[in-house]
Amino acid sequence: MKYENYRLPGGKTLSEGTFEDIRWQYGVFRCNSTGAGRDKKYTPWRAVKTKLGEIEECDWCKLVEAVIERENEVPLLNALIQWCNEHNYVSASVSEMRKEALQLHASRIFDNPQWIGFIPFNAKYRPEILNTANIVFVRMACCPEAGAVTQEQIDRACSGQISCPHCGRWNSFTILERESIPGTYPFDSEHTSVEHMEHMTKKEADTNDADSPWEEDDEL
């Protein structure tokens, strides 16, 4: 491994470092200067603040990649890179998308049920994770179809709003079903997608939501 002898801030070696040690807390930028008078030159310096201290950004990226390789999680990183590229709404560069994926990986975003991408990402790349997730079925004010979110997202609702699992807008919601519906778990095949789960639960959700503002439309 290229960075196996690299000494992390605090004296740790790469073999001792964890994702928590090198998790991106915030970026650091400084302008270093050399020389004096007309010969004075400025050089930008970018780094990442971590639990262990500041690590130059280019070194940080390589270190995270090395830890990912050590933990045999390269396929998971590739999945995150693909996910970031699919959600690249600001047309960021390839290198920026890779850096974002490394940030997400080091923070273990895919294990955080509060992440709005927790269900769709894991349904696509790690379906077994959803077998133990606290799935809640909701109907959003913006979209009539039932959708799946996590209980943790409900618990962290901001002003009574969560991100819509369909369109992504933050809106109010109605809880329809807190438990999985027989036949939709585990997520063990390409046919058992989040969309399939929502379709399978729509009738059940309507039964539990007799006062739904869409009930009249459903009967037409």
Image (spheres, rainbow, N blue to C red):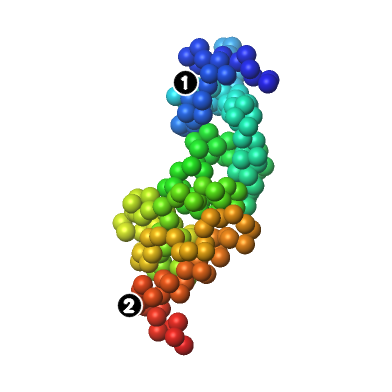
Disc 2 secondary structure class: loop
Q: Which residue is mark 2?
A: 211
Q: Position of residue 112 (x, y in %)?
A: 45, 43
Residue 167 vs residue 144, the one in the foreground: 144
Residue at image point 57% right, 60% down:
193
Q: Is residue 96 above or below residue 133?
A: above
Residue 28 in view of the camera: no
Q: Is residue 212 left or right of residue 193?
A: left
Tell me the mark number nearer the camera, choosing from 2 and 1.
2
Which label is found at residue 20?
none
Q: Which amino acid lies under the numbered mark 2 shown in the image of this protein?
A: Asp
Q: Position of residue 51 (x, y in %)?
A: 44, 24
Q: Earlier in the sequence, mark 2 or mark 1?
A: 1
Q: Which residue is mark 1?
A: 53
Residue at image point 47% right, 72% down:
202
Circles 2 and 1: CB atoms closer than 8 Å: no
Residue 135 in view of the camera: yes
Residue 89 vs residue 123, the one in the foreground: 123
Hey, which quadrant is residue 7 in on the image?
top right
**How many numbered tags mark residues here?**
2
